[in-house]
């Protein structure tokens, strides 16, 4: 049996989800930028043994787990942009409760 969430609880849960999604997007952007820089260093220094695959692969595994936690295994699915995302999440949660 599902229990109805109050508007405040719904808002807090939706806000948490928006923050988790933003955190993942930031993680992805940093991953791409740093690893692109490592590939450039490898290429500029003579393109010998491709050592950059080790941090790229290890960090990629961590990024995959971050993705799974945020988008696949999440329990429930204040700037202007954030308010729009929060409202969207709240509306989705309201529909699921019916």
Image: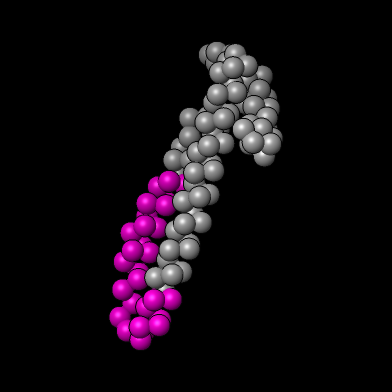
- On screen, residue 15 versus residue 74, left or right, reads right
Q: Is residue 31 magenta?
A: no
Does the image show residue 81? yes
At 54% from the left edge and 26% from the top edge, which residue is drawn?
Answer: 13
Stretch of the chain drawn in magenta = 40-67
Q: Residue furthest front?
A: 79
- Residue 8, image x and y in percent? 59, 17
Nearer-the-camera pick, 69 or 26: 26
Nearer-the-camera pick, 10 or 71: 10
At 57% from the left edge and 30% from the top edge, which residue is drawn?
Answer: 15
* Tally of numbered discs: 0
When the figure is inspected, residue 82 is found, relative to residue 35, above or below; the finding is above
- Residue 53, image x and y in percent? 35, 69
Q: Residue furthest bottom?
A: 46
When the figure is inspected, residue 38 is found, relative to residue 3, above or below; the finding is below
Give the quadrant of residue 97: top right
At 58% from the left edge and 29% from the top edge, which residue is drawn?
Answer: 14
- On screen, residue 41 versus residue 7, left or right, reads left
Nearer-the-camera pick, 31 or 98: 31
Screen quadrant of the C terminus: top right
- Residue 20, image x and y in percent? 50, 38
Does the image show residue 71? no
């Amino acid at each position: 049996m599902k229990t109805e969430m109050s508007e405040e609880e719904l808002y807090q849960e939706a806000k948490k989800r928006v923050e988790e999604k933003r955190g993942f997007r930031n993680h992805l952007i940093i991953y791409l930028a740093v690893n692109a820089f490592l590939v450039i260093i490898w290429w500029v220094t003579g393109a010998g043994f491709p050592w950059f695959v080790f941090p790229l692969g290890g960090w990629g595994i961590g990024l995959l787990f971050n993705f799974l936690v945020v988008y696949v295994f999440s329990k429930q699915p204040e700037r202007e942009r954030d308010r729009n995302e929060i409202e969207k999440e709240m509306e989705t949660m309201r529909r699921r409760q019916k």
